[in-house]
Image (cartoon, grey):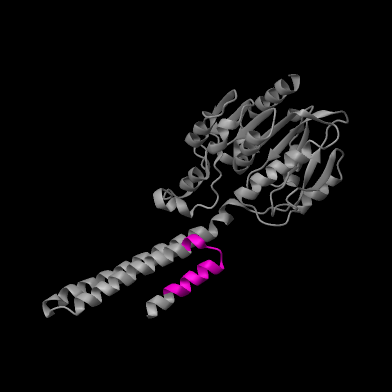
Amino acid sequence: MTFAAAALGLVGIFVWFGLGLLAVQALVVAGIIVVFHLAVRAIGYGASRKIQVQQWLKKFCSVLLCVLTLLISVSGLIYAVQDDMFFYNVKDEESREILLGEPGYSEVAFTAENGKTYHGMLYRGMDETAPLLIYFGGNGEVSYRNMRNRLEQNQWQYFSGYSYLYVDYEGYGLNDGSANYMNMYEEALAIFDYAVTLPAVDTERIVVMGYSLGTGCAVYLAAHRPVAGLILAAPYANGFDMYNNMLPIFHSPLKLLIKQKFPSDEYAPDVTCPVLVFASHADEAIPFASSERLSAIFSGDTELVELDSVLHDHIFSADGVFEKVQSFLEEIKAE
């Protein structure tokens, strides 16, 4: 009875915190232990020659209980901390203040049909109507810092002739909430729908660009809206590849522990625009094989640029990467 009460208490805790999967696991484990306990008691009522079997089963149940308790604890820990591994909730007020004092930069804020308000930054390098690039950053990026880097590292030359829009994920920058892959997908569509309403935007030439974590949003958007081009740096085929690259245990039943699924490979076949992909064999965060697999299933013309000795955070620093981006953008602009 004591064990049953403890198990039910554990289930209640999991349900309270919204951990439905772990609640089910706890119930299953409790059921297994109860079955074994009843079996032991049944055997105990048997003949005395079965006492040794009874003792062995009791020891077995104790070991099994310890092992399963450990597995549940580890599973709960993985389930609880994984969002912190993906989302850093960057703010960077310093970069925001610097940009607001520079010409061409303006803050944007809009309320989408879902009732949420999203904040970010827009950069216009010209006054006339121009194509637009929508950027989705990695988990350590925020709109203000990204554009400050573009300014200080003289990178706007590679985006010449384009306006540049970066709207932050939920929980980043000035946004409320917390990010997860589903609301990131929802936000990506809302950003496009907002972008086509902006003045001086060539709505026939909107290009989407994503880096690392943001490539999932970029692929999803390109599959659901009429974009003119898609640029991906260090993309993944799905969230399982990212999890297993960090800890290679998420196979078979353990896949159920994964919260951030990011199934880019599910949406890639619906992308019909031209695609430019950068992936490195030395990328320690996103396996090259995952990027390569994703690149192979786009329906549009796809170019995979393979980098040899470039680490994940240095993709854009690699020789020729920005020049390739510039050439891609110029081709779309000229069409």
Identified at 52% across, 41% down, the residue is 238
Total marks in image: 0
Check the image and report above or below for 207 versus 26: above
Magenta portion: prevailing SS class: helix
Side of 67 relative to 314 (left or right):
left
- Whether residue 235 is visible here, answered yes or no, is no
Q: Residue 27: x and y, percent?
A: 42, 67
What is the residue that sits farthest to the top in this orientation? 335
Camera-side residue: 53 or 312? 53
Side of 107 relative to 236 (left or right):
right
The quadrant where residue 314 appears: top right
Q: Residue 94: x and y, percent?
A: 78, 52
Is 239 colored magenta in this rendering? no
Q: Residue 325: x and y, percent?
A: 67, 27
The N terminus appears in which quarter of the rendering? bottom left
Camera-side residue: 90 or 200? 200
Identified at 42% across, 78% down, the residue is 5
The quadrant where residue 136 appears: top right
Side of 292 relative to 101 (left or right):
left
Camera-side residue: 129 or 8? 8
Check the image and report above or below for 295 versus 16: above
Q: Residue 35: x and y, percent?
A: 30, 70
Identified at 65% across, 34% down, the residue is 222
Identified at 85% across, 46% down, the residue is 100
- Whether residue 166 is visible here, answered yes or no, is yes
Which contiguous range is marked in magenta? Answer: 7-22
Check the image and report above or below for 18 versus 44: above
The C terminus appears in which quarter of the rendering? top right
